[in-house]
Amino acid sequence: MRLEKIKTQGLAHLSYFLSADGEAAVIDPRRDIDIYLDLAREEGSIITHVFETHRNEDLLSGAPVLKEETGAKVWHGPNPEKPIQYAAETREGDTFEIGGALLKVLETPGHTDDSLSYVLYDKSFEEGPVGVFTGDALFIGDVGRTDFYPDRKREVAGLLYDSLEKLLGLGDQCLVYPAHGAGSVCGSGMADREFSSIGHEKLNNPRLQIGDREAFIDAKVAENHYIPPYFRRMEEGNMEGTEAAPPAPRPASPARLLDPGDAVCLDVRGIFDFAGGHRTGSLCIPDDMLAAFAGWLLPGDKPVLLVARDDDQAVDAATTLQRIGFDNVSGFVSGAMPVAVQNGPLDTLDFVDTETVAARVDNPPAGWTLLDVRAIDEYESGHIKDSKHAYVGKLPDAASDLDPDKPVTVMCGSGARATIAASQLLRNGFSEVDVYIGSMKAWTAAGNAIE
């Protein structure tokens, strides 16, 4: 028996390849499926089953693609928002044999109504399950968010509590295999560790320390989560089924940077590359932050022209975009030099340090705003005096009361999100924008007060 975990960087998505005695199953596959096919070839096994723990919100499922490629049957839970076109329904108590492995279905709603967990048994050993694929019900160090049904907040939080009780009853020896790890938007307190057991979570997971059902519901209802606009497109895609991703983008003529037409110039090189020189009007989202912010800021109805350091970065960026449904990548250009040498539209972005920001806070320039673009929980836990909050993902609407002709300094935790936000403000006509590099980490390291 072999169990392989496949981590999708950026999305912090975890899928699993399980094989035993020439048969194989995949749990919660991503859209680009080559890795599962390679593992099956390496193992000499046939993928016969694909199991989904729930309707994903943050990425497109690869289950229909695997079904088309391998003929495997796809299984999904009951009570989906709409019928899952490519899957058959499975319910609590159903069992599936994968060679010497046995998977038993548990219904674990709360995160979504259709959430399932799959309990893994080794048929050679009868004393309890080996592990459980928990989807987004139970994470390592956290539990699933329950804010996708705003009209049923207390009901679904209670459903999750009951589901967790089921999972805790599997025994301390049972290993936990969630669908996401630290960094995912599907939870906020996950441990930066990808292995655990039911016993360890019972002792250490903060949400599992709340033994009273009503207190648990109160805690879940009080959480603050953001729902990116692309989630709805992912939900629709994961009910109807998606096709295989298009081929990798090809290099585009450097002239495209001078006249990209209606394409969005998406600069994925990194914040320092962007600050040093970028095409006017381009959107900066570093490649390792694409999964978190492209779905917020990138329009879904326009082609994308990537600006990357090299071919490899461009292909990786396009793959990340395809995982969240942005297929219309029309090509890529390496760097901003083609704009510079042709005297085209080129801009830079200024970074400012702690001393400069402190001086501005003490003696604000006329009309100046210090804009904090962290999540609201981060802002409320401590912020610089007189700073204004507007979450980066909700710009520019969140900063609609700012005057685009007045100076703005953007800050976050370190300066990365602030650079993304600054590029969005510049695209929307703000004329005087700079970034506090280091941001809150630099501010507190210098011993400055926060509110």
Image: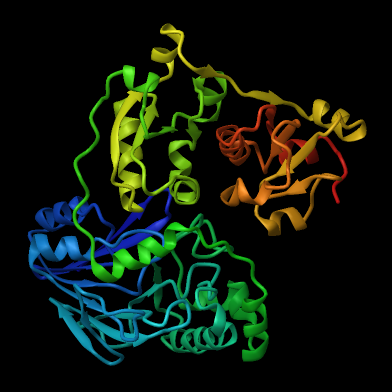
- Residue 106 appears at what percent x and percent y? 34, 86
**Residue in the picture at 58% in, 82% down:** 153
**Residue in the picture at 31% in, 28% down:** 332
**Residue in the picture at 61% in, 33% down:** 429
The scheme the figure's colours follow is: rainbow
- Residue 304 appears at what percent x and percent y? 35, 37
- The reply, left or right, for residue 317 in relation to residue 430 is left
- The reply, left or right, for residue 403 in relation to residue 286 is right
Q: Quadrant of the N terminus?
A: bottom left
Taking depth in this image into account, of 12 and 366 the one nearest to the observer is 366
* Residue 207 seen anywhere in this rendered image of the structure: yes
Taking depth in this image into account, of 124 and 57 the one nearest to the observer is 57
- Which image quadrant is residue 231 in? bottom left
Residue at the farthest bottom position: 93
Q: Is residue 183 above or below residue 273?
A: below
- Which image quadrant is residue 402 in? top right
